[in-house]
Amino acid sequence: MAEAVLQVENLSASYRKNTVLFDVNFVVQAGSLVGIVGPNGAGKSTLLKTILNLHPSLTGSVKFFGLPFNKVQKRIGYVPQRGSVDWDFPTNALDVVTMGLYGQIGWLKRPSRLHKQKAFEALEKLGMADYADRQISQLSGGQQQRVFLARALVQNADLYFMDEPLAGVDAATERAIMTLLKELKALGKTVMVVHHDLQTVEDYFDHVLLLNRTVIQYGKTKQIFTRENISRTYGGDLRWLREESLHVHNPIK
Amino acid sequence: MFTILLNSNTQWVLFSTMIFGIAAGTMGCLAYWKRQSLMSDALAHAALPGVVIAFLLLGEKNLFVMIIGASISALIGASFIQWIRSSTRISADTAMGMVLSIFFGLGIMLLTVVNRTSGGNQSGLDSFIFGQAASMVRSDVTTMLILALAVILIVFIAFKEWKIYLFDPEFAKGLGLSLKWMNGLYTTILVTTIVIGIQAVGVILIAALLIIPSVSARYWTQSFQRMIIISALFGGAAGALGTFISALGRGWPTGPFIVIVASALFFLSLFFGKEKGILVKYLQLKMQKRLVNIHTSKALRTKGVE
Amino acid sequence: MTYHAMWIIVTASLVGLSCGLIGVFLILRKMAMMADAISHTVLLGIVIAFIITRELSGTHMLIGAIFAGLLTAFLVQWLHSLDVQQDAAIGIVFTTMFAIGVILIATSVGNAHLDVQHALMGEITFIPWNKISLPLIGEVPKATALLALVLFVVLFVLVAFYKEWKITSFDPALAASLGIPVLLMHYVFLCLVSITTVASFDAVGAIMVVAMLITPAASAYLWTDRLSIMLVLSGLFGVISAVAGYYIAAWVDTSISGSMAFATGLVFFISFLFSPKHGWIARYLRLHKTVKKTG
């Protein structure tokens, strides 16, 4: 039995007066590559933010490696949605990646050449070495996402949370990102990814968390990702399901 | 104290600030749903150079000409904001802040020149900065009344067009409403509302009368129509009461008192409003917590069954 | 140049420099209108400090300003959390606090040294008359000394925490997940804005300080894609506008503060037209070229 890297118990959260999440419970083992799947408004992003203390929780507790968040902050990496930042910010790709190291560099110190070297290597790994000096607004959507991934990579965390890293990117970027995620997994790291494309869930993730305001099912993709569970998650939106079910391979059948 | 009310000039001034308050409250609702609350602040400041230039050209104070000057200068400000926004990466609020302060600076430059040439504060232009309703004469009152009524009328006649234009402009376009015309009309009546109030409330605080009543009204209703009516009532009340209070003291500026009354009404609405008021919300939150607990215990029970 | 004029130019340049530096982060954090709000509410802070202490010293003014700045931010945040649109919240808070300030002056303390007109328009011409003597340096106008102190604080805080300012401005969510106290930094930043505003008050007044805060930064934003260069340019533009404003005012014989605000506008207009990357002419030419190519 692998070590439990993330333990979420009875988590609930609300936006204004709507409860977005309630009674969320699950345990993630080390080395899992988890896809978080659910309809729009299911609370996927909120779940990540609440787990990371970026959004207040109403009830419940979250433990990382058996410890509270502030004790293990340095072992956790977060990739926000690409749209959450202003890409007109006056800075270049290398600089954004270096930001991933700010936590390690510490107060009052500047990034050294070694830090820049590290950042550059991360960019290289994502095939972005040529764009290191490029102003970030001049990058394509896929390139911006790769920069974000490179930034997560330099954090050298053990547990990653990624909010829709595959949304709106080109096929080449999608492949590059998935290769990277699988590499991370091979290194024994744990990655949780908010994902919107049901067709690729089975190829990409070994675990899946079906979410619709609470956990509908969580477990190994092969066992959990069934038509029945998906329709439960998506609230029986049948018209949509019929189209989609052609692509969903059903292991139970 | 009530002798003030008997003075016929005061009555007229009071009446005109009330009508102005109603117009501002009405217009403010449109600005609120267009998400342009601070735009009115920028436009008010941008109007100052126009006021002063109108005075310089005419050599005397004539409210009607000044309103035209103010409108032109505010419209130039508005198009600068639009131009900067659309052709650079500078964000809307930065563009507004720039236009607001630069135009105001230009206005102060010109005002200083006027004050120097016409000897001290003889021109009475200083009242345009803080507002001095008492300085209005009968003809000013008439001008203000006519324009304020025109604004109110335009909003109410085309009520359903405004509603659809603000709520879903794309759909409005589909219905054959010209967005270009609506935008133009919107800017025109917004600027008109602002400039007619400048003498009574002053350029710095005029935005308050467009912003505060409409936000207050939201705490009492969910319907757009009622929101406009309530906002107009709040605006009118703030205009009249504020002017009355400021008339009690010698040389008290009108604008700040009108704003204080408006924001007192706002805080009353904020706490006691029946839609989303703090009191109502507190009770709702309590209920919410109970609901979450019910959910949780339900979930626990079903788990137990499994 | 007379001795008097020299002090005015030094003071104005200090305003331009500190406002220019702060302004860069103001516009990158999308807080331009927040600066407008604070510049107004700081008046209330000064009035209250004056009512309590019955004198108008630099320290009291700074404390009053910080108090007012934080209160403004807190109230705006509070209203926003209650579902009021952000800019409507700003509009409500600053107009109300400003109105209270003006009323307090007009009714209770108006006969004293406080003058709304002065606070709003600034009167840089009087600055050189009110001097204090400092060790080593000698006689220095009070307002100039205060500005120099504020500039020092601003420079120190911006440089020392440069990378933290950068990351919290660009991606606050990531910053928070890295353990950087985003909220604390936000409030520290508001304090910097408040003290810069109040120190510039004497020179340029409440409304024109907004021009000094955001216009040089917006101009610099059009010239460069690097944060460090943007800071340098913005400070430089601030100083240029301040000095140019002084000469324009001397030439037309009008308000110095108004002219300084106007001069920032000129600097922006030039940047807006001629910047090689983001300028209007460059854009127009680029557009023209592509049209020619494609058609």
Image (cartoon, rainbow, N blue to C red):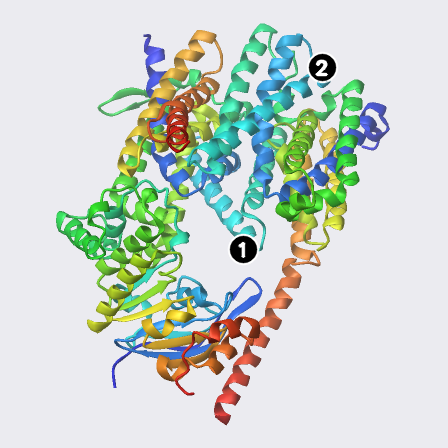
Helix, strand or loop at mark 2 = loop
Q: Can residue C288 be seen in this view?
A: yes
> Could you classify mark 1 by the number of other residues whose Cα lies within 10 Å: few (under 14), some (14-19), or many (20 or more)?
few
Residue drawn at the location 65% of the way across and 49% of the way down: B267
The disc at residue C81 is: 1
> Which x, y percent locates residue C99?
60, 35
The amino acid on which the numbered mark 2 sits, given as a three-letter code, is Asn
Say how many tags the image has. Answer: 2
Q: Which residue is drawn at 36% across and 17% down?
A: C243
Q: Quadrant of residue C227?
A: top left
In the depicted view, which residue is nearer to us: C281 or B291?
Answer: C281
Q: Position of residue B4 (x, y in %)?
A: 81, 28
For the residues marked 1 and 2, what is the alpha-carbon distance in whole angstroms?
A: 45 Å
Which chain does tag 2 point to? B
Pointer 2 residue:
B62
Residue A55 percent across, percent down from the top left = 44, 63
